Image (spheres, rainbow, N blue to C red):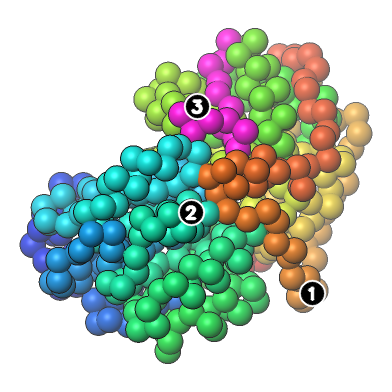
Amino acid sequence: MTQSLSFADLGLKKPLLDAVAEQGYQTPSPIQAQAIPAVLAGKDVMAAAQTGTGKTAGFTLPLLHLLADGPKVQGNQVRALVLTPTRELAAQVADSVATYGKHLPLRSQVVFGGVKINPQMMNLRRGADVLVATPGRLLDLYQQNALRFKQLEVLVLDEADRMLDMGFIHDIKKILALLPAKRQNLLFSATFSDDIRALAKGLVNNPVEISVTPPNSTAERVEQAIYPVDKNRKAKLLCKLINDGKWQQVLVFTRTKHGANRLAKQLEENQITAAPIHGNKSQSARTKALADFKAGRVRALVATDIAARGLDIDQLPQVVNFDLPNVAEDYVHRIGRTGRAGASGKAVSLVCSDELKELKAIERLIGQVLTREELPGFEPVNKLAETTLDSRPQKPKKPKKPKAHGDGQRSANNAGKESQGRNSGQNRSGGEGQNGKPRRRRRPQGPKSQA
Ligand code: AMP
């Protein structure tokens, strides 16, 4: 149905259509086809959409369309506020705003912590039609009188589930209290947990609800497999997979910052260019690692979950879970890094016997037993038990305790803790590698969650 739709059919202005055409987008993605008309109609929207669905353009295009028709922004005022959980996502959303808005006379700005606040304050003097911000820095700027919200028309919460996971709920509530009551609210979240629904209750009015992938379903186009392997052989197995598969660009997830550093070093020692990206790295180091990876100067980007959130890397063919995440939903976020906007991708997980519990939780969440593959020479001594699909109804989750809040100064703290809550400090350094051709052992897959 949405196949034959064009962006022009959605009623967007010519300057936006031109910008979209320059990006080479032919047809609106399903989230865009649904979100754009709803936002243009002035409705509140609640959308369940993972990264990779085109959600950013889904809210940015109609937002710019509406703003182009409104009054001129005054000094220190903001007309549309987009809140994101991480600096990387803020930077990427701001890039999208600039890209799609390039033929419109609108001002946009991005603010996040970890960089100097003064230039941000100076820039805000002229006001911003669109301000993309992380919550902590936004509050800091407000407290320093650099921001006012009298002209605010639209609020967007992007990746709201991750904001709650990162403990931003108090900051979000503080921010909501500063905004005019009459405004349009757009809430985007990869999953719709009870916590998100509770947040939405106090936020959106009579929203248009959109869901382009059912909550917690895995991206369809991503081919997934696991390699059962001993913990101390994971690094060597990864080197072999990268070399044998001639992977030129691979995003590798570790559970801990420490693990990311160590693995990046091990890859380098095996002549695979690698860079770690996590919350203990300075903003400039993170930006550089990402730029090097995108430009192909670095083959493996080794990331923790929080640092990787929101990374938009076009057509990333390969994602590796070096460790399984403790939180099953993170698996879905991780593999969502590949197979984006129509591209195909592959996600493999290196799973040791200690990770059986995490594996079962993931398989239960995605509704399928993951295919197992093995490389001769890497068969685990500590066998990973076979799994079957647990289809009992899931128990409701306990509400999460908020962590340290804010970003910037505060999020440096927060990010400093980013994986420690979840990590158990395992040593996952590698053993010796051996040669041999991959041997595949396919298993029948369980039922998928509804398409
Ligand atoms: P997002 O889900 O917003 O992170 O977008 C994922 C990727 O899809 C980005 O790299 C966009 O440039 C790309 N994209 C967004 N909309 C479209 C579209 N309609 N057609 C093709 N690619 C798109």
Instruction: Say whether residue 132 is left or right of residue 366.
Output: left
Q: Which residue is tagged 2?
A: 140
Between discs 1 and 2, the one toward the N terminus: 2
Does the stretch in magenta take in 340?
Answer: no
Residue 63 x %, y %: 26, 67
C-alpha gap between disc 3 and disc 1: 41 Å
Looking at the image, which is closer to me, 192 or 72?
72
C-alpha gap between disc 1 and disc 2: 38 Å
Residue farthest left in this picture: 14
**Whether residue 63 can be seen here:** yes
Residue 85 x %, y %: 52, 54
Between discs 2 and 3, the one toward the N terminus: 2
Between discs 3 and 1, the one toward the N terminus: 3
Q: Which residue is tagged 1?
A: 395
Q: How many marks?
A: 3
Residue range (magenta): 271-286
1 or 2: mark nearer the eye: 2
Instruction: Say whether residue 376 is left or right of residue 88.
Output: right
Q: Which residue is tagged 3?
A: 285
Residue 240 x %, y %: 65, 20
Q: Which mark is residue 451?
A: none
The reply to whether dot 1 and dot 2 touch (C-beta < 8 Å) is no
Residue 275 x %, y %: 55, 23
